[in-house]
């Protein structure tokens, strides 16, 4: 995982052209892990190297751990995946002419959302002799 003090192997800041727009996601942003995971999934579909995809996914996991360790609110990837599915359903509902189902309302959308939390795994029990 790259940090400000220790850039990763695929440091986008160093690789950016002088006038190239860029957007940085910080580990404290509760939505950054999900956005990074999505980026990795899309890049994987595009044929990106497995090393770059792995580093992005590991950074996503490290961001969640960072948030947890610093007492920040975390949003699990599952919650964001559900949001994405619901958005696709909303788009499909509105795109199909003559559809017999009603468009998903915002209240229905919110009702489907689930809260997921990062929970640290318990320490394994130590063997006693």
Image: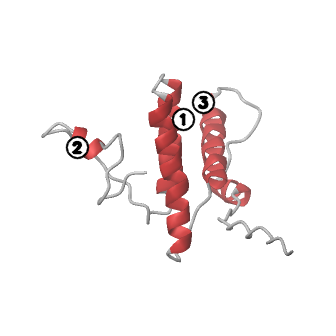
Mark 3 or mark 1: name the one nearer the start of the chain. 1
Q: Secondary structure at mark 3?
A: helix
Residue sticking out furthest to the right:
129
Kindly identify which residue carries mark 1. 41
Query: How far from the left and from the top, in percent, is residue 125?
Result: 81, 71
Q: For marks 3 and 2, give the one nearer the viewer.
A: 2
Mark 3 or mark 2: name the one nearer the start of the chain. 2
Q: For marks 3 and 1, give the one nearer the viewer.
A: 1
* Badge 3: residue crowd in 10 Å (few <14, some 14–19, many ≥20): few
- Which one is in front, 87 or 5? 5
Which numbered disc covers residue 14?
Answer: 2
Task: Tell me the residue at 65%/27% (across/down).
Answer: 96
Quadrant for the C terminus in the image: bottom right
Q: Number of callouts in the render?
A: 3
Q: Distance between the Cα atoms at labels 2 and 1?
A: 23 Å
Task: Tell me the residue at 35%/41% (across/down).
Answer: 9
Query: How far from the left and from the top, in percent, is residue 76?
Result: 62, 58
Q: Is residue 109 above or below residue 42?
A: below
Q: Distance between the Cα atoms at labels 3 and 2?
A: 42 Å
Kindly identify which residue carries mark 3. 95
Q: Is residue 85 left or right of residue 50?
A: right
Q: Secondary structure at mark 2?
A: helix
Query: How far from the left and from the top, in percent, is residue 106?
Result: 63, 55
């Amino acid at each position: 995982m790259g940090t400000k003090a220790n850039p990763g192997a695929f440091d986008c800041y160093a690789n950016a052209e002088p006038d190239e727009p860029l957007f940085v996601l910080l580990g404290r942003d509760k939505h950054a892990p999900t956005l990074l995971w999505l980026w990795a999934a899309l890049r994987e579909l595009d044929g990106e190297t497995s090393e770059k995809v792995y580093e992005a996914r590991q950074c996503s996991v490290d961001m969640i751990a960072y948030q947890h360790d610093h007492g920040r609110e975390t949003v699990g990837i599952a919650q964001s995946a559900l949001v994405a599915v619901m958005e696709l359903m909303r788009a499909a509902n509105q795109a199909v002419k003559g559809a017999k189902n009603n468009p998903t309302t915002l209240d229905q959308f919110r009702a489907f959302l689930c809260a997921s939390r990062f929970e640290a795994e318990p320490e394994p029990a130590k063997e006693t002799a």
